[in-house]
Amino acid sequence: MPTTSRKKPFVPADLDCSTWPSIEPYFQQLAASEITSPAGLRKWLADLSDLIAVVDEHGTRLYIDNACHADDAAIEKRYLDFVEQVEPHVKPAVFELQKKFLASPHRAGLREQKFAIMAREWQADVDLFRRENIPLQTQATKLVTQYNKLCAQMTVDYRGQTYTMQQIARFGEEIDRVVRQETWELAEKRRAQDVAAIDGIFEELLAIRAKIAANAGHANYRDYAWVSKKRFDYTPDDCHRFADAVEKTCMPVVRAMDEQRRTQLGVDKLRPWDLAVDPLGRAPLRPFDPADIPDFVDKTQAVLRRISPDLAEDFQSLRDTHCLDLESRKGKRPGGFQATLEVHRQPFIFMNAAGLHRDVETLLHEAGHAFHTLAARGEKLVFLHSAPLEFCEVASMSMELLADDYLDAFYTSDDAQRAKRTHLEGVIRLLPWIATIDQFQHWLYTHPTEAADADARHDAFLKISGRFSSPLVDWTGHEAIRRTRWQRQLHLFGMPFYYIEYGIAQLGALQVWFNYQKNPGDALKKYKAGLALGGTRPLPELFKAAGARFEFSAKTVAPLMAAVGKEIERLPA
């Protein structure tokens, strides 16, 4: 880990953040500080930033450790002790300091736009804060930990070997249809064992979130989430317009792709286990051996070097600091994420690589988040490091697209073209799933009575997903699985109302990518400039800085889908 660049730190480097009594005096000192000038306010903010960074990094390390070792009781206890014994005290302390800043007459002396952005966000936090919600939020975190633990424990035995759920997914690309069906059904049978338990966890989360919203004076959790996520630049109606645009512009393309797939496979009906295999009967794309993670990392770095030597150097810094945990193994939490160690401004990437092409996309995606973290290092205040999530995902999704022309680091020339086509088809298929999850969340949190009932919840998901599902896929005999597919979407549990961001960002990333096709140097310059702004500008300005437009109705979706369609047509089947 590199040495921190903190200058004249307010908090000692060896501060024990595992207990509240060791942290509390620093919050008390800031609360009691007399601020007599704009310069004094800047110094006070710098001290608060230093304190928050230290506490945040401690919590993030515990979170990462728990994700990497979800089956370790001692590690889980340390993480939950922090969640239960420290965070509930930090939140009200931060609330009081946010109020102190907002009430300061010296705010007028902080003329930079970034302080107006910060004040708007802090005002939203203050408006929502209720002390009675702290234990509820702690309880929700514990429930999400239970869900993650359940998922981490899921394994499947097949032909004498045990596989995690990520590893068994490899067989979905096998040419042998019997193998695909066997492994798909085994995986779904295993998931079915925990459907009731996961439903129970989710119902508790729904009830808790309803209480949190009501305590904060909101009619439902959607209204609460809109404020808590600082969605100042769009409305729920914009999300519905996005869904309508996806249904009208993406679904016809998806249906056409599925009909082509059915014909190429030579089957009467597509089944759920037919959707990942190569339709022309070619061997699955295997970009790397999952037992050789260093090779995976080497090849990813080679791709990044061809996009930008600077980005390759940034990626090397993650290797040098041991901030990559990529392999899939028993007891490890599923999914992938990038977390930031705020004191050191150091990214950490977590994922479960199983030797699939999707793993390449995932590592590039999380690398994009890491580049965003590193690009924004110039901003000294921790509160302004992170952009709104809608733009954070532009950083990551753009990297997936920019890498498409350099995949020969993993494959032969023919397979690299095939991988690019697979990715672009995946972009078109992803938008309907994003719309499904987002519209399902709108329903969940605006129909609390029905959502509390498992059957009604599953029925609603089935109805909503029907808008964005291809009728060419036959689910006969597996209807129950189709109704509960939402349970594997981690965001619904740990990050409620977070998913539309991917759709908004995908449209931004496509614009960055098409700019790159026309002028690589200029597009990269703008991309990096947007990342460097961190959270100091509103969403429309961040998109503009990166060379994209912040708009996600049919006006934007339709031409982008048409352009992606043309790119796919130019690639060999």
Image (spheres, grey):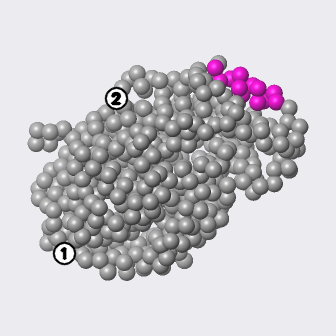
Number of marks drawn: 2
Please say whether residue 313 is one of the residues in the magenta stretch: no
| Residue hosting label 2 | 71
Tell me, yes or no, if residue 452 can be seen here. Answer: no
Residue at mark 1: 263
**Magenta stretch in the rendered image:** 22-33
Callout 2 crowding tier (Cα within 10 Å): few <14, some 14–19, many ≥20: some
Residue at 50%, 53% (x, y): give it: 371
- Our reading of the magenta stretch's main secondary structure is helix
Task: Check contact, mark 1 vs mark 2: CB within 8 A.
Answer: no
Q: Is residue 331 above or below residue 180?
A: above
Specify the amino acid type for callout 2.
Asp
Q: Nearer the viewer, mark 1 or mark 2?
A: 2
Question: Residue 63 at what x, y percent from top left?
Answer: 47, 34
* Rendered position, 123 above or below 208: below
Q: In the rendered structure, find residue 252 and report the number of the disc placed on it.
A: none
Query: Left of 386 or right of it: where is 156?
Result: left
**Within-10-Å neighbours for mark 1: few <14, some 14–19, many 20+:** some
Amino acid type of the residue tagged 1 in the rendering: Thr
Q: Residue at x 32, y 80 (%)?
A: 570
Verify whether residue 27 appears in magenta.
yes
- Quadrant of the rendered image containing residue 309: bottom left
Between 523 and 1, the residue placed more toward the observer is 1
Residue 517 visible within the image: yes
Left or right of 426 in this view: 187: left
